[in-house]
Image (cartoon, grey):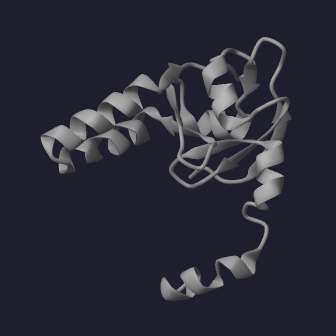
């Protein structure tokens, strides 16, 4: 299970370090996609298969449109020996990444946030914001 919040930066060559703990859990082949919340989502090979299998629940025309968007905006990468992955400039621009990055484990996947956006939205910092939802789940 991917957990924790990790702060680091992107280097001048657009390489991002996947934190060692997350890298170990994600495995050798990972997929990174754009998310609707203006962050990047990171999936292990197994979770990527689970994610894309859900396309089968859509109508043929919906599945084609969604697959076209998701696959054309996804990258498959293998972290180098130092745990770095090369991010395309289009993904960096989409996520608003300038230098500092927050990577968070979200259970089955991880998210990569521009530090400024993370701070602006105060992501995950206000437990009272989630109390009602957690109570509804009986947690």
Q: Is residue 123 above or below residue 70?
A: below
From the viewer's side, name the closer residue of 50 and 99: 99
Residue 26: where, in percent of width, then height?
55, 36
The foreground one among 30 and 121 is: 121
Residue 97 location, quadrant? top right
Q: Quadrant of the C terminus?
A: bottom right
On the question of residue 93 being in view, the answer is yes
Report x, y in % for residue 59: 15, 46
Residue at 54% of width from left, 36% of height from top?
34
Q: Is residue 34 left or right of residue 10?
A: left
Left or right, 71 with respect to 117, comes to: left
Q: Nearer the viewer, residue 81 or 103?
A: 103
Residue 87 in sight here: no
The quarter holding residue 45 reads top left
Which residue occupies the extreme top position in the image?
13
Task: Give the residue displayed 20% in from the left and 48% down from the top.
Answer: 58
Residue 61 shown left or right of residue 7 in the figure = left
Tally the marks. Answer: 0
Q: Nearer the viewer, residue 52 or 66?
A: 66
Please give the name of the residue rendered at 22% of the width and 43% of the height, measured from the top-left corner.
Answer: 62
Q: Residue at x 34, y 37 (%)?
A: 49
* Residue 43 position in % (x across, y down): 50, 38
Q: Considering only vertical position in the picture, is 115 above or below 1?
A: above
User: From the viewer's perspective, is residue 108 above or below residue 91?
Assistant: below
Q: Residue 72 occupies which quadrant of the picture?
A: top left
């Amino acid at each position: 299970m991917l957990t924790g919040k990790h702060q680091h930066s992107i280097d001048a060559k657009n390489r991002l370090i996947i934190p060692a703990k997350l890298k170990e859990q994600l495995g050798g082949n990972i997929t990174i996609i754009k998310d609707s919340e203006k962050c990047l989502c990171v999936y292990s090979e197994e979770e990527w298969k689970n994610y894309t299998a859900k396309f089968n629940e859509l109508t043929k025309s919906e599945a084609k449109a969604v697959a076209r968007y998701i696959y054309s905006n996804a990258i498959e990468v293998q972290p180098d020996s130092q745990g770095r992955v090369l991010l395309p400039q289009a993904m960096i621009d989409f996520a608003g990444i300038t230098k500092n990055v927050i990577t968070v484990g979200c259970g089955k996947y991880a998210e990569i946030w521009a530090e400024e956006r993370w701070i602006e939205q105060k992501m995950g910092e206000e437990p009272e914001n989630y109390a009602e939802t957690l109570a509804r789940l009986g947690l």
